[in-house]
Image (spheres, coloured by chain):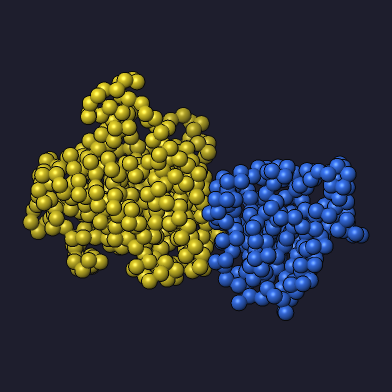
């Protein structure tokens, strides 16, 4: 890195090399009572941190990841120029909105994930085999409980902010509801306070495609023999819902893979098909099918209205400032849902800012540059700091 | 969000200078630390100034996504949305001051908005262009054309003003609805763009007006 880049605070830099840490919560103090009525113990949590915790321990920002991401939110794991940085690297680093010169950023793989935290693909210590379908059902509320254990473990009494998109945004909302005394700022992005039947329907089609793959075998597949065609298809369906009609048109148009000529075949012929196939097949390499079933179920069950009577009641104890962000072209978690959330927060007397950011990128917009999310987040966090 | 308003595609930049005319006076009318609601806050210029100079606790409502993003990036507390819809959700007396700066003529239900403004705020500041200014009268009389000038910078087919009002119309409304006028300011802009306060015959001579209102005890607009 050049000397000048190091000196100029306005230059956005990478957090550099990072590694995933693990902490095991075991013993009588750490028996997780799940919403489903089951219990789970011990629990391993994989997490990464960036920046340093202030002496007053008041600068911690918890990042909650979405469906298929992990604890690796920023920086690099290997000294390999081809390696892609963590999934929210555009937001986390010195000079970036989650400025690691100012904030101590934490991201953990949520409960029931397959990236190091206890979940269906991990070995059940009682049997020595992967949990598979013996893993208990878990909810967003359960995920947040485990995140609280981690935050306690790191010695943090109050988080400066909790931020996340999509399923990550659901965790943010649950944090504000479950642990109101521990959150100063909540940033739910491209999310909803209750899954819509349409979103549940897409999840169900994804699950059915996994479960109808013979290799799934009621969840009893070997780790290296995943139901790859089912999982790949599930991912393809997901990706359709993450894009918008406009972004597909912009990215692929009607282009064929081989120039302008039709191939007269059922194999991938259009570029959009190629994209989906690629997304599907690479996903199988990095994600576990049973885990996908469980996580989508956790999303489906997320409904703050049903859990607390009304949305207004759900947030009645919350003490944080909210920044709600939606995107104009997100049809998976549409603007109307965020607007409803903002209305409820306002009626509950909570401090709330809201922006429906103009973007044609669909639901994926929260993971992409090219819209105004970053500066809106920076403005909000800076204000939150000043308000003390 | 009301698509009808969005689809009008108003070029708000045309009226930026006019919209800032009363900022110094609104600043004077604001108390230190006041809770201020700016309905249709645009890029947030006024709120930023009030925050800087008076340390207000601000909330802006803005329909335009880009302007709302500008406000939020600048560190303002803003909700993107339709001001007529959003104001309904606030409790009575939630604010010390409610600002309706050059917005009353562009909403479908100005009376309802005024009523809600007086309900959620202890005081309401309203500004609008005066349609009874002598130059406008002459223009319509002799040229037969609607005015397009510094204070009404839009052609008839692109204007956000779907209502027209004069000083006397507004005073009449306040009288009939028992709204108390605490402060009024009438100005006209000279040929060089300089502002001049108008004390005599404001309905004829002022081009821009400001009223600071509150509820009277027997007002039709009492909360509840």
Residue at 24% across, 47% down: A206
Residue A321 image offset from top left, x and y in percent:
49, 61
Number of numbered discs on residues: 0
Looking at the image, the residue that sits furthest to the bottom is B218
Looking at the image, the residue that sits furthest to the left is A127
- Work out whether A66 lies above or below A85: below
Visible residue check, residue B15? yes
Q: Colour of chain A?
A: yellow
Residue A69 image offset from top left, x and y in percent:
30, 46
Instruction: Name which quarter of the figure residue B11 lies in.
Output: top right
Q: Nearer the viewer, residue A166 or A145?
A: A166
- Work out whether A358 lies above or below A271: below
Visible residue check, residue A382? no
Residue at 29% across, 35% down: A276
Q: Nearer the viewer, residue B142 or B112?
A: B142
Residue at 63% across, 75% down: B223
Colour blue belongs to chain: B
Residue A205 image offset from top left, x and y in percent:
24, 49
Q: Nearer the viewer, residue B149 or A89?
A: B149
Horizontal placement of A222 versus A24: left or right?
Answer: left
Residue at 22% across, 35% down: A281
Residue B126 image offset from top left, x and y in percent:
73, 60
């Amino acid at each position: 890195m050049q000397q000048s880049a190091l000196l100029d605070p306005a230059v956005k830099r990478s957090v550099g090399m990072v590694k995933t840490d693990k902490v095991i919560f075991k013993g009588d103090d750490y028996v997780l009572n799940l919403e489903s009525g089951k219990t789970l113990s011990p629990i391993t949590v994989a997490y990464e941190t960036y920046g340093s915790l202030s002496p007053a321990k008041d600068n911690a920002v918890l990042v909650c990841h979405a469906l298929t991401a992990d604890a690796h939110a920023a920086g690099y794991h290997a000294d390999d120029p081809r390696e892609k940085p963590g999934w929210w690297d555009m937001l986390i680093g010195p000079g970036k909105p989650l400025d690691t010169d100012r904030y101590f950023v934490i991201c953990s793989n949520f409960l029931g994930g397959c990236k190091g935290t206890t979940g269906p693909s991990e070995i059940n210590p009682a049997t020595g085999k992967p949990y598979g379908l013996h893993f208990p059902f878990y909810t967003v509320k359960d995920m947040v409980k485990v995140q609280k254990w981690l935050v306690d473990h790191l010695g943090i009494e109050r988080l400066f902010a909790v931020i996340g998109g999509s399923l990550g945004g659901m965790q943010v909302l649950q944090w504000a509801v479950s642990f109101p005394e521990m959150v100063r700022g909540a940033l739910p992005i491209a999310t909803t306070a209750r899954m819509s039947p349409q979103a549940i329907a897409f999840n169900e089609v994804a699950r059915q495609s996994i479960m109808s793959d013979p290799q799934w075998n009621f969840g009893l597949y070997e780790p290296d023999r995943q139901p790859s065609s089912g999982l790949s298809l599930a991912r393809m369906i997901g990706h359709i819902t993450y894009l918008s009609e406009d972004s597909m048109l912009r990215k692929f148009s009607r282009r064929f893979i081989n120039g302008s000529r039709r191939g007269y075949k059922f194999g991938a012929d259009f570029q959009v098909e190629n994209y989906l196939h690629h997304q599907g097949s690479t996903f199988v390499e990095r994600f576990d099918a049973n885990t996908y079933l469980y996580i989508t179920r956790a999303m489906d069950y997320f409904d703050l209205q049903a859990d607390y009577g009304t949305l207004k009641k759900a947030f009645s104890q919350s003490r944080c400032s909210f920044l709600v962000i939606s995107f104009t072209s997100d049809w998976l978690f549409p603007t109307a849902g965020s607007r409803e959330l903002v209305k409820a927060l306002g009626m509950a007397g909570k401090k709330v800012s809201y922006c429906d950011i103009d973007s044609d990128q669909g639901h994926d917009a929260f993971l992409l540059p090219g819209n105004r999310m970053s500066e809106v987040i920076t403005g909000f966090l800076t204000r939150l700091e000043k308000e003390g | 969000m009301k698509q009808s308003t969005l689809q009008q595609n108003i070029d708000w930049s045309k009226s930026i200078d006019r919209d800032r005319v009363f900022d110094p006076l609104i600043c004077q009318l604001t108390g230190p630390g006041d809770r201020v609601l700016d309905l249709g806050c645009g890029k947030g210029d006024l709120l930023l100034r009030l925050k800087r100079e008076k340390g207000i606790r601000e909330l802006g409502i803005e329909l335009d996504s880009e302007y709302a993003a500008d406000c939020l990036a600048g560190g303002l507390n803003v909700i993107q949305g339709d001001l007529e819809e959003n104001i309904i959700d606030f409790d009575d007396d939630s604010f010390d001051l409610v600002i309706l700066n050059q917005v009353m003529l562009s909403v479908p239900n100005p009376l309802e908005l005024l009523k809600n403004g007086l309900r959620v705020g202890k005081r309401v500041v309203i500004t609008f262009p005066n349609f009874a200014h002598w130059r406008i009268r002459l223009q319509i009389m002799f040229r037969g054309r609607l005015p397009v000038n510094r204070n009404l910078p839009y052609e008839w087919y692109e204007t956000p003003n779907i209502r027209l009002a004069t000083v006397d119309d507004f005073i009449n409304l306040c009288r009939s609805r028992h709204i108390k006028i605490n402060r009024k300011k009438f100005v006209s802009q000279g040929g060089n763009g300089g502002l001049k306060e108008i004390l005599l015959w404001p309905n004829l001579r002022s081009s821009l007006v400001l009223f600071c209102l509150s509820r009277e005890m027997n007002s039709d607009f009492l909360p509840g």
